[in-house]
Image: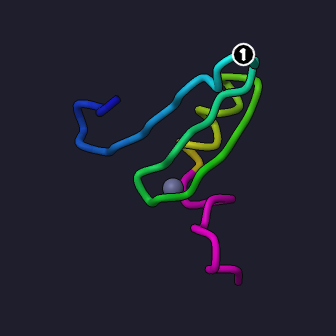
Amino acid sequence: MTSPTGEVYRIDWLPGTDVLHGTCHCGAEHTAEDPVAMWEWMLGHPEGHLPEGHRS
Ligand SMILES: [Zn+2]
């Protein structure tokens, strides 16, 4: 899934579950059961989604 703005987000359903798995254009990954929560996480970039290994 590529948005018209050129920012790349991927959101997939995990098969057999209600869980969404999202990958941000920054490479951070996130899972959520609520699509709204997922989009808030995406749009809240970069808050809460630093790639692993980049803890502040
Ligand atoms: Zn991000």
Q: Main secondary structure of the magenta part?
A: loop
As drawn, is 25 to the left or to the right of 52? left
Query: Number of callouts in the render?
Result: 1
Pick out the residue farthest to the bottom. 56
Q: Position of residue 7 (x, y in %)?
A: 31, 45
- Camera-nearest residue between 24 and 5: 24
Residue 26 falls in image quadrant: bottom left
Please check the rendered image and state whether residue 34 is part of the magenta-colored stretch, yes or no: no
Query: Which region of the structure is painted magenta?
Result: 45-56
Which image quadrant is residue 15 in?
top right
Q: Is residue 47 magenta?
A: yes
Report which quarter residue 18 is drawn in. Answer: top right
For image coordinates 60% across by 23% down, the residue present is 13
Q: Which residue is mark 1?
A: 16
Report x, y in % for residue 1: 34, 29
Q: State the residue lying farthest toward the front.
A: 16
Residue at 56%, 39% in the rendered image: 22
Q: Nearer the viewer, residue 49 or 16?
A: 16
Which amino acid, mark 1?
Gly
